Image (cartoon, rainbow, N blue to C red):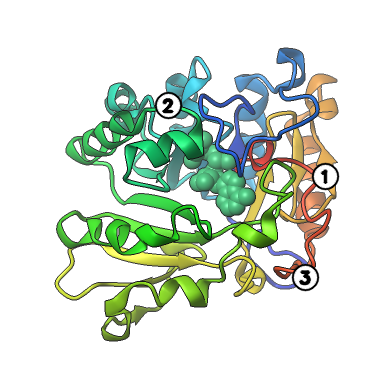
């Protein structure tokens, strides 16, 4: 069964944020003011999320990504992944993590069916890592990446958010990881979300065209056509590299025309677009005994209400996203 929205896009991808808690405090992601965490009772239980996933898979979602907050801080995540893997119709289960707990959790996650993993890593320099995240844990992330590779996870995607004056001088170094390792290293434009980056967004934002130029060999690499598994990234390869590099530019290159995703927040809202204020509540239905068909109806309603796109640019971004990325899951 296919889920097609009002603009003819096939929707087959659901991102589930299982918690808004995180063990890092990245200053472009963590809100600097206001209430910081959801109460436990506000967060969907795994059983509730599984009901949404079951409904989603029944109507055509084939790929689910677990995210957060930091998904590996929530107890029971491995068992949840195993239950998702068993869902009829689901072809791919992926997870996005900061990698802090990955060294010890890669194997159980792999056994639970997680094959595709995205790891956030904005810098390879320990002091800088601490400055960005608040903790001196770079070695843990690197050990986690290695463990995921050793255990056979594939592809391993390393996501770096590029920020002017913070890590834009490290693009070549990060890209060079692909010379010897089979990773996809993807450089991402900073997005305007509610949180501490908001105040100095215009200073930190660097457009993709500018940071692409920082990889000196870029003219000699082939841009590969995007395929399903690459999502919004435009991929290329350094000469002789085993891995790939990618560029994701939600501001400079809107990819709304091929957007295939919905998001479920930890507190039970379906978001139809990262940059839309609109959220469709599904928690109330889940907590008042809705049947599978009723949950499917809410899911279909969300698909029907998915907007054609966002209209953000680097200058006009006020109120772009009312919640911190940590609460939505990226
Ligand atoms: N804790 C996990 C992690 O670190 O990957 C998953 C959640 S995190 C919110 C998902 C992704 O969103 C991370 O790669 C993070 O770098 C990215 N992110 C957070 N705030 C962002 C922003 N303002 N612009 C671009 N990416 C952002």
Name the N-terminal-most of marks 2 and 3.
2
| Residue situated furthest bottom in the rendering | 219
Q: Quadrant of ligand 1?
A: top right
The answer to whether mark 1 and mark 2 are in CB contact below 8 A is no
Which one is in front in this view, the residue at disc 3 or the one at disc 1?
3
**Quick one: label 3 or label 1, which is nearer the N terminus?**
1
Question: Label 3, label 1: how many angstroms apart (C-alpha)?
Answer: 18 Å
For image coordinates 32% across by 79% down, the residue present is: 218
Disc 1 CB within 8 Å of nearest ligand 1 atom: no
Identified at 50% across, 57% down, the residue is 165
Residue 163 placed where, x, y %? 53, 57
Marks 1 and 2, how far apart at CA? 28 Å
> Taking 176 as reference, is 22 left or right?
right
Q: Nearer the viewer, residue 19 or 293?
A: 19
In the displayed structure, 299 sits above or below 209; it is above
Residue 64 screen position, x and y as percent: 52, 44
Packing grade of label 2 (10 A; few <14, some 14-19, many >=20) is some
Q: Which mark is residue 82?
A: 2
Task: Identify the element where label 1 is drawn.
Answer: strand
Against 292, residue 296 (above or below) is below
Dot 3 falls on a residue whose secondary structure is loop
In the rendered structure, the answer to whether residue 212 lies left or right of residue 104 reads right
Q: Compared with residue 296, is residue 112 higher up or lower down, i.e. above or below?
A: above
Q: Quadrant of residue 20?
A: top right
- Mark whose residue sits in front, 1 or 2: 1
Find disc 1 in the rendering and name its residue: 279
Front disc: 2 or 3: 3
Q: Earlier in the sequence, mark 1 or mark 2?
A: 2
Residue 311, numbered circle: 3
Label 2 to label 3, Cα distance in Å?
Answer: 38 Å
Viewer-proximal residue, 288 or 267? 267
């Amino acid at each position: 069964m296919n889920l097609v929205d009002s603009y003819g896009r096939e929707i087959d991808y659901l991102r589930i944020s299982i918690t808004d808690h995180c063990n890092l405090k990245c200053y472009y992601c963590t809100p600097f003011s206001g209430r910081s965490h959801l109460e436990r009772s506000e967060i969907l239980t795994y059983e509730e999320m599984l009901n949404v996933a079951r409904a989603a898979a029944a109507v055509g979602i084939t790929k689910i990504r677990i995210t957060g907050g930091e998904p590996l801080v929530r107890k029971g995540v491995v068992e949840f992944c195993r239950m998702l893997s068993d869902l009829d119709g689901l072809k791919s289960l992926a997870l996005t993590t900061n990698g802090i707990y990955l060294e010890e959790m890669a194997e159980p996650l792999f056994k639970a069916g997680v094959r595709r993993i995205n790891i956030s890593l904005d810098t390879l320099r320990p002091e800088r890592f601490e400055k960005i995240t608040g903790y001196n844990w770079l070695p843990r992330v690197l050990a986690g990446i290695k463990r995921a590779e050793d255990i056979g996870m594939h592809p391993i995607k390393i996501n770096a958010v590029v920020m002017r004056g913070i890590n834009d001088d490290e693009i070549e170094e990060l890209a060079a990881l692909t010379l010897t390792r089979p990773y996809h290293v993807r450089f991402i434009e900073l997005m305007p979300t509610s949180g501490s980056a908001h105040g100095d967004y215009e200073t930190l934002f660097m457009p993709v065209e500018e940071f692409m130029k920082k990889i000196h060999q870029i003219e000699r690499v082939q841009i590969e056509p995007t395929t399903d598994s690459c999502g919004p990234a435009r991929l290329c390869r350094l000469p002789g590299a085993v891995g790939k590099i990618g560029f994701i530019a939600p501001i400079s290159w809107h990819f709304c025309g091929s957007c295939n995703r919905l998001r479920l927040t930890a507190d039970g809202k379906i978001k139809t677009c990262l940059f839309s204020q609109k959220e469709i509540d599904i928690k109330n239905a889940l907590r008042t005994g809705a049947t599978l068909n009723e949950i499917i109806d809410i899911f279909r309603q969300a698909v029907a209400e998915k907007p054609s796109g966002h209209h953000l640019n680097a200058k006009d971004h006020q109120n772009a996203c009312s919640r911190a990325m940590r609460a939505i899951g990226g």
